[in-house]
Image: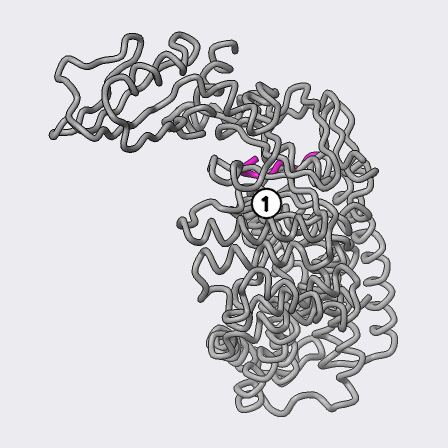
């Protein structure tokens, strides 16, 4: 079943701009200059129900605009969108019962009150009865491990604690689809892990679809099976995360430790030696699998001595994504 | 309905989160009332009469207390919506299953009620001490009904200015103009009774008299004819401004630009 269907979606914004200085300010009063920003340009994609989809792109790529159109708070200029069977900007309120949203940089919890007050308010807004709300709060408290600070005013929580409460708040009404716009922004490693674990668990337990935007490749690897990369309002890549890595990770790093010293002249043709340890027992090389076959490299490495340990790794996903952005920029 | 009561409740809780701050801020009304008393005391003394245009010094001071309470306690919707558009938090308010206007109404009431209650008490003490006892309890119900109507009118005008933020983002200049019109044409600084007849009738043909003068005048000089006149005027303006608010929201949504994407 399809949860989100987007076809030829476009959205432009008119932005006022003026040059620096007093003269330009006065001129702008009488003759304001506007520029047209095409935030989304002919975007088309689908997302299945219960799917975990990454939606990524550099700043200004059109991710947040797309998410706001999907929730019905922005009207598109062209194209069609169906979210859980509703046209968001026409049926915003009906759709709201089925959607959970987290805009990582904007708080939805009441700042001066404890999170439990916001949870109870959301229970009422989504028309849950009091018993159901209590049950749900206790369930989410367990999954997101927020029991210790449920009654502490939000202003006194750490960012990590607050974000866990933000995501929990968006799940009070058992939504069918969760739209997460940079939920891990600004969090430390431990807090990110907490959020990822809790989101993954909720998605699995309740078959909630998750559309996630993030600048952190770790979020994608931990949560998403499929990824859509957009740049300048257009899709530049979409496929499974595993295929993304396989297709773009043509470079491999190999670290080898030998039982004896390797010869000072040792090198494998078609590879680049990055580092040799001082005692000459370990060596680190990089090679491109399209130019130098893996079997060839492995044969030469094992012929050089008795192997004690070997590690083959891919470059970080961030590098892959950055390369895709760059190649898309080149085309534009 | 339950959801709007919950929104009212959470705004009330937020207002009461810092009671000392509310009381301190409400303390400003003491300074205003002291200044008003000095001004009007001099005016009445200079006129050599106990009554000017049917109002005594005591009536004038209690009139001004109601007007100041409304001014300091009225909804700040324009500022709130403008801020929500600027910081992008409007995104969270528009994607929930409620009527956005009623949400703001319930929230505004939760914010205003404690403030207005405290303003009346804190401001009433010096006025009582300086000018005399408040009007009889029988005057209160019609004045409170008119106060409710005036609050709703302020809500509508403020909401219209706030929704302009969907397009213009910065609405402080509009709010400034509206505030000054209420000061002058609403009879906030000087009771409308003291105005020349032509200015009184101009003011009464606009919504401003029903937003400030109506409840304040009913508090000090209750009169069935005036009560009917104020209530009917408020209802007419509520239909007009409420309708405009609903249209502005529906149109504004189509033009909304949210910062940060």
Quarter of the image where one finds residue B233: bottom right
**Is B221 on the left or on the right of B48, as rendered?**
right
Would residue B167 be seen by someone viewing this image from the given angle? yes
Task: Name the residue rendered at 67%, 55% in the picture.
Answer: A171
> Magenta segment: does it hold B159?
no
Indicate whether A12 appears above or below A86: above
Could you tell me residue B214's position as x and y percent?
A: 75, 69
The residue nearer to you, when weighing B259 against A241, is: A241
Would residue B70 be seen by someone viewing this image from the given angle? no
Could you tell me residue B212's position as x and y percent?
A: 69, 66
Residue that badge 1 annotates: B85
Indicate whether B190 appears above or below A211: below
Report the magenta residues as a range.
B255-261
Magenta region, main secondary structure: loop
Indicate whether B103 appears above or below A50: below
Task: Name the residue rendered at 41%, 27% in the picture.
Answer: A314
Could you tell me residue A234's position as x and y percent?
A: 61, 20
């Amino acid at each position: 079943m399809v949860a989100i269907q987007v076809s030829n979606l476009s959205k432009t914004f008119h932005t006022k701009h003026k040059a620096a200085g007093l003269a330009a300010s006065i001129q702008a009063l009488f003759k304001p200059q506007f520029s047209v920003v095409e935030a989304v340009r002919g975007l088309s994609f689908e997302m299945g129900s219960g799917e975990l989809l990454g939606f990524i792109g550099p700043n200004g790529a059109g991710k947040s605009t797309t998410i706001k159109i999907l929730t019905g708070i922005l009207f598109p200029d062209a194209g069609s969108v169906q979210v859980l069977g509703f046209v968001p900007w026409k049926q915003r309120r009906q759709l709201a019962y089925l959607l959970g949203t987290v805009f990582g940089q904007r708080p939805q919890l009441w700042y001066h009150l404890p999170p439990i007050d916001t949870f109870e308010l959301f229970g009422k807004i989504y028309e849950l009865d009091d018993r159901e709300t209590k049950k749900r709060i206790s369930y989410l408290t367990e999954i997101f491990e927020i029991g210790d600070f449920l009654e502490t005013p939000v202003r006194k929580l750490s960012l990590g604690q607050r974000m866990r409460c933000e995501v929990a708040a968006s799940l009070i009404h058992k939504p069918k689809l969760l739209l997460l716009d940079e939920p891990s922004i600004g969090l430390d490693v431990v807090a990110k892990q907490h959020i990822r674990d809790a989101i993954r668990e909720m998605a699995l337990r309740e078959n909630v679809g998750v559309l996630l935007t993030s600048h952190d490749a770790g979020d994608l690897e931990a949560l998403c099976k499929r990824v859509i990369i957009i740049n300048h309002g257009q899709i530049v890549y979409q496929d499974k995360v595993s295929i993304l890595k396989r297709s773009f990770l043509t470079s491999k790093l190999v670290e080898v430790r030998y039982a004896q010293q390797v010869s000072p002249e040792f090198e494998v043709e078609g590879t680049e030696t990055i580092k040799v340890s001082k005692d000459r027992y370990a060596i680190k090389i990089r090679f491109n699998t399209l130019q130098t076959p893996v079997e060839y490299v492995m044969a030469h490495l094992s012929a050089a001595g008795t192997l004690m340990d070997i590690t083959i790794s891919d470059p970080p996903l961030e590098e892959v994504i950055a390369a895709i952005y760059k190649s898309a920029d080149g085309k534009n | 309905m339950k959801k709007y009561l919950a929104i009212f409740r959470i705004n009330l809780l937020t207002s009461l989160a810092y009671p000392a701050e509310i009381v301190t801020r409400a303390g400003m009304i003491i300074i205003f009332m002291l200044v008003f008393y000095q001004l009007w005391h001099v005016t009445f003394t200079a006129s050599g009469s106990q009554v000017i245009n049917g109002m005594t010094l005591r009536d004038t001071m209690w009139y001004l207390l109601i007007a100041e309470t409304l001014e300091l306690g009225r909804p700040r919707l324009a500022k709130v919506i403008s801020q929500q558009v600027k910081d992008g938090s409007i995104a969270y308010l528009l994607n929930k299953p409620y009527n956005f206007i009623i949400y703001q109404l319930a929230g505004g009431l939760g914010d205003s009620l404690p403030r207005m209650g405290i303003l009346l008490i804190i401001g009433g003490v010096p006025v009582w001490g300086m000018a005399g006892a408040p009007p009889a309890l029988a005057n209160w119900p019609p004045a409170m009904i008119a106060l409710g109507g005036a609050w709703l009118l302020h809500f509508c005008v403020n909401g219209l200015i706030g929704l302009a933020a969907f397009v213009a983002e910065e609405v402080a200049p509009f709010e400034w103009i509206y505030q000054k019109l209420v000061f002058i044409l609403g009879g906030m600084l000087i009771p409308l009774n003291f105005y020349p007849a032509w200015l009184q009738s101009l003011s009464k043909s606009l919504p401003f008299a029903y937003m400030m003068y109506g409840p304040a005048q009913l508090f000090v000089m209750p009169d069935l004819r005036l009560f009917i006149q104020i209530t009917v005027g408020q209802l007419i303006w509520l239909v007009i401004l409420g309708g405009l608010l609903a249209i502005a929201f529906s149109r504004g949504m189509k033009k909304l630009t949210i910062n940060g994407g």
